[in-house]
Amino acid sequence: QVQLVESGGGLVQAGGSLRLSCAASGRSFSRDAMGWFRQADGNERELVAAIGWSGVTFYADSVKGRFSISRDNAKNTMYLQMNSLKPDDTAVYYCASYVSWATMPSRVRDDYEYWGQGTQVTVSS
């Protein structure tokens, strides 16, 4: 069955870096739009970054210039490189995907059909 599995979360000091990975299985994800969402305690799940099947990207204003999303279709894997981390980045990070022929990935959470189980990122001050 279709499965998304995140890895790479952990505890890091402010200013540090982490690289999250999302391994997809069950079928090819080369025609999927994929995204990274995060949910902090008491907050709604929000889109952090997304990448379309062709490589077009979107970033939330809060992470622009610090985070970078990428994908390796040959490996069915998506990445999120997070630099200059801040305590406000602390959250559970989820990867998600949906089949899309559109160039631009959706910013709407409900458009994403498949979800991983999440990985915790904690940034200490």
Image (tube, helix red, strand yellow):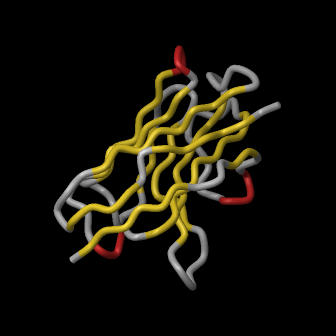
**Residue at the farthest top position:** 74
Q: Relative to 83, say whether 125 is above or below.
A: below
Which quadrant of the rendered structure holds the N terminus? top right
**Residue at the farthest right position:** 1
Q: Is 19 or 69 nearer to us in this picture?
A: 19
**Residue at the farthest front position:** 11
Q: Quadrant of residue 39?
A: bottom right
The x and y percentages for residue 5 are 61, 41
Q: Residue at x 57, y 28 (%)?
A: 53
Q: Residue at x 57, y 85 (%)?
A: 42
The x and y percentages for residue 59 are 41, 53
The x and y percentages for residue 17 are 24, 52
Would residue 12 be found to the left or right of residue 55 on screen?
left
The x and y percentages for residue 114 are 73, 45
Q: Is 77 or 124 nearer to us in this picture?
A: 124
Q: Residue at x 52, y 51 (%)?
A: 36
Q: Relative to 10, say whether 39 is above or below.
A: below
Which quadrant of the rendered structure holds the C terminus? bottom left
